[in-house]
Image: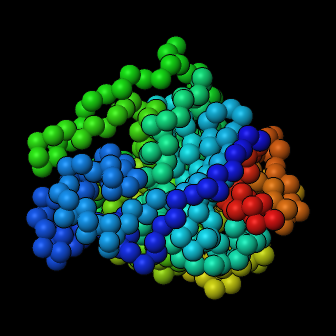
Amino acid sequence: MQGRARYACRVTTPGRLDLHDLTREELRLQFVRWGFSPVHAARLWAYLYLELAEDFSSMPELPAKVLARLETEARIGVLPTALETDSSDGFTRKYLLALPDAERIETVLMRFTGRVTACISSQVGCAMGCVFCATGQMGYTRHLTPGEIVAQAVHVARALRHLPPPKTFSAEPVPDDSAIASASPKPPDPPTSPAPCASPASHALPKPLVSHISPASSASTVPTTSVAGNASPSGKRHVLHDTSPERRLRNIVLMGMGEPLHNYEAVMHAIDILRDPNGLALAAERITLSTVGVVPGILRLAQERRPLHLAVSLHAATQAERAALVPAARKWPLDELMAACRTYSETTGRRIFYEWTLIEGKNDTPEQARAVGTLLRGLPAQVNLIPLNPTAGYDGVPTHTAAAKAFQRILADEFSLPSTVRQRRGIDIAAGCGQLAVAERH
């Protein structure tokens, strides 16, 4: 494991307004309340999300009176890096980020052919208590604010400007950007009537999945810097530095520390900021939210028709087996969860990605494959099979490749269910959810 501690961190002031907490419209209204022109708010927004500025001294276009007000009453919620680890293959980099109250959260940068994904956290710790999850073993501390969620994506976007590209890239990703092997019968047809608030494109089913790691293109040097950018209100161009795919954050997966639907308001507010077309401009179909099965949150997502991908952590096909792995199943039993998932798919027309952690001898058998196939029969579904990422607090071991392939084949041949086996990324840097935070505490 390659790592370096960086504890000489910038100190932020929690009492000030975190600018990353605000949507573009909220920032405009704040400037109006301060008696400043909305033009200056637009300039500030460009500095935050196009220039990725870390401090107010990097904003020469803003008038002195605006900067003075910002220095007094606001802050840019930069999250200092307490610890950074790099995988030996160059594809994965994990950051342990420091919060103003001295808590720590994890963010992971993953690079694939032609695109980059950030895995971000939504809470400090987690209240769901999944027995095989390092974050679940930590327990719950607090929710993250919208700004702390947004700041993780900004951190990755900023880091991409300075990182050298890996010599080769990993395979073409699926929506959660972490699977490489697939068994894909013809997927269910897309819905005929997409959700009213989403474009039809956001309901297109994912591209066919690949079953190999693609070599990189012959060019392995740092791409040429581009000067393309958005014009500021003053007519100047805000430089985007490098718009090549390997340098641009394209995908977000809310699969880090915490349960996103337990922190619903903050997570959705952050997603609105990340999707702003004048900022990081992350497309809704490039955002995946993973939940342990918080039924009220799933139903609310359906009601609001949020145009993002939903992944549900299933892990077992009976209530008793699931409750043993996922304590939250005692509050939201399996039958209630599946009813909520059915409502979600019927309301939004979207397919759900069901996550299944493969634990040797526990839930990786042919009988278990048939059980999950039966459970999902008739639903627009894809199964993401995830070999267990071992943690100190759980004595299970990951399944073998042969068992995973047999599991896939049963889903495909007997139930026509598409599935993937997720690539285990960053094993050498404790990239699994919560692992680095737990290690740092000890």
Q: Residue furthest bottom?
A: 331
Q: Is residue 20 above or below residue 107?
A: below
Q: Report the number of numbered marks.
A: 0
Q: Residue at x 60, y 24 (%)?
A: 168
Q: Position of residue 432 (x, y in %)?
A: 70, 54
Pick the quarter of the image with the N terminus.
top right
Q: Is residue 58 left or right of residue 184?
A: left
Closer-to-camera residue (111/48): 48
Q: Residue at x 71, y 44 (%)?
A: 3
Q: Residue at x 86, y 55 (%)?
A: 397
Q: Position of residue 53 (x, y in %)?
A: 36, 50
Q: Position of residue 43 (x, y in %)?
A: 20, 53
Q: Is residue 20 above or below residue 324?
A: above
Q: Is residue 171 left or right of residue 4?
A: left
Q: Position of residue 400 (x, y in %)?
A: 83, 44
Can residue 193 be seen here? The reply is no
Applied colour scheme: rainbow
Q: Is residue 403 left or right of residue 76?
A: right
Closer-to-camera residue (224/310): 224
Can residue 75 be seen here? The reply is yes
Q: Residue at x 53, y 76 (%)?
A: 143
Closer-to-camera residue (189/244): 244
Closer-to-camera residue (437/162): 162
